[in-house]
Image (spheres, rainbow, N blue to C red):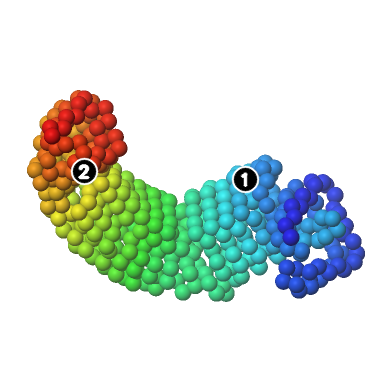
Amino acid sequence: MKKIIVVVSCCLLILCGCKTTMHNDKSGATAQIDNEMKTSVTPLKFKALSDSTAEVIRNDSYKNLDTITIPDRVQIDGNVYVVTSVGEHAFDGCKKLKRLNLPSNIAEIKDAAFWGCGLTSVVIPPNVSGIGAYAFTHCLNLEYIEIPPSVTTIGDSSFDMCYNLQTINVASDNSFYSSMDGVLYDKKKSIIIRVPPQMSGDFVIPLSVTKIEPDAFGNCEKITSVKMSSNLTSIGDKAFFRCKSLKDIEIPQSVTYIGSDVFWECVSLTRLELPSGIKNIYHGLFYGCSRLSNVVIPQGVTLIDELAFSRCSSLTNIVIPNTVRAIRSSAFMDCTGLTAIDLPLNIEYIQGRAFKNLKSFRKPHLLIYNNGTKCYGWIGDEDECTKIVIPNGVKEIGDNAFVGCKMLEYVEIPESVSVIQNYAFDNCENLDVVIHNSEENVKVGFGAFGRCKSVKYTK
């Protein structure tokens, strides 16, 4: 049975009837409720979950509330419901909410229930078993969280972007989670889950830790160094996202997985050696690490993903090992200090814009790869790209190969080229293209010659 319950705001207390009623729950069992109680009248809205339970639901009328008290029970149409959960997004965006009183019978705080609230401290009630994903995310004033023994699950990113968070305290008799020095771990302290962003200085990860959860150190802007456990094997997505003061970190060789965006905008990081066991450098790993001048990519890496080193403006030279098979879009885009790249000849795929806007590149040139069969396009200062003759033997010109090369006036394409990918010469307004083939023998992608001056097939 689903029923929306609205309890009208009033200054009175409603006295429930003095008799005991019986309700059948969905499993068929009979629940006994003593109606001899007082139910505070409240502006909150509720939804029935069963014949006997209800949850608080979202309503825009909460936005101006600074204090919220959720009642133990609510009554409507003569029926009494025990309030057992706070619904998804129930108080999402209640920035003025400073004080929260939760009844002891609350069993679940659902996803994003208190996203963006103005709370300064939260004591989770003693019967709550589940805290949903993003439950307290972006609570900018939140400083303290207390987690009782009853909690068995904490969803992803429950306490992310709580920039003023100082302490997470877990009851010592909780069977699933623990805390030490204000940091949230699993019970065995093998997983580090959340470091409060107000932590500062040097941080030592306990030897028992084998895994760093996604966003564990996210926005910890005052931490300057992290000493990792020699037993560590996995670092989750955004683990050190925007740790802007982080200068010193050494990843042990035991690590075999490093997720996406891990060191995104760690602007104080100057050097890092990646462990030999990783196979992929994922999306945005070092994006915006503007002081990173030295990074070692180990043999065995096969993929450098999108934005992996983008905007690493202090990076001057990088060696790509011969195990790398693919470099994706924008991987080194806006590395404005990069003067040279050592690329293996047998690399199989370089996506368009992978090396876009390398203004300091020492020898701008046409980049041919995959043993001479593929043309990436121009690498280096685009103003020096004025005339191009694609070598014979090249079979494919990549997407966005020469896009925006406004000084490019002439391109000659050999008969061996059978594929010209999307936007290859887009927006080259002064360009005359000569293709030594017939139109039917060349597959031309969308917008490949957009705004070009002329395109001529010689056969």
Q: In the image, is 318 to the left or to the right of 164?
A: left
User: Looking at the image, which residue is at 12% across and 44% down?
Assistant: 416
Q: Residue at x 38, y 70 (%)?
A: 210
> Which residue extends farthest left?
392
For residue 40, what is the image quadrant?
bottom right
x then y, percent, for residue 265: 35, 47
Residue nearer the viewer, 112 or 290:
112
The residue that appears at 68% across and 46% down in the rendered structure is: 59
Secondary structure of the residue carrying tag 2 is strand
Q: Which residue is mark 2?
A: 419
Camera-side residue of 7 and 69: 7
Spot occupied by residue 166 in the image (x, y as percentages of width and height): 50, 56
Foreground label between 2 and 1: 2
Residue placed under numbered mark 1 in the picture: 94
User: Measured from the top left, where is residue 363 in percent x and y?
Assistant: 11, 40
Residue at x-position 73% and y-position 63% = 50
Q: Within 10 angstroms of label 1, few (less than 14), some, or many (20 or more) residues?
A: many
The type of residue carrying mark 2 is Val
- Closer to the chain start, of discs 2 and 1, is 1
Q: Which kind of residue does numbered mark 1 sit on?
A: Cys
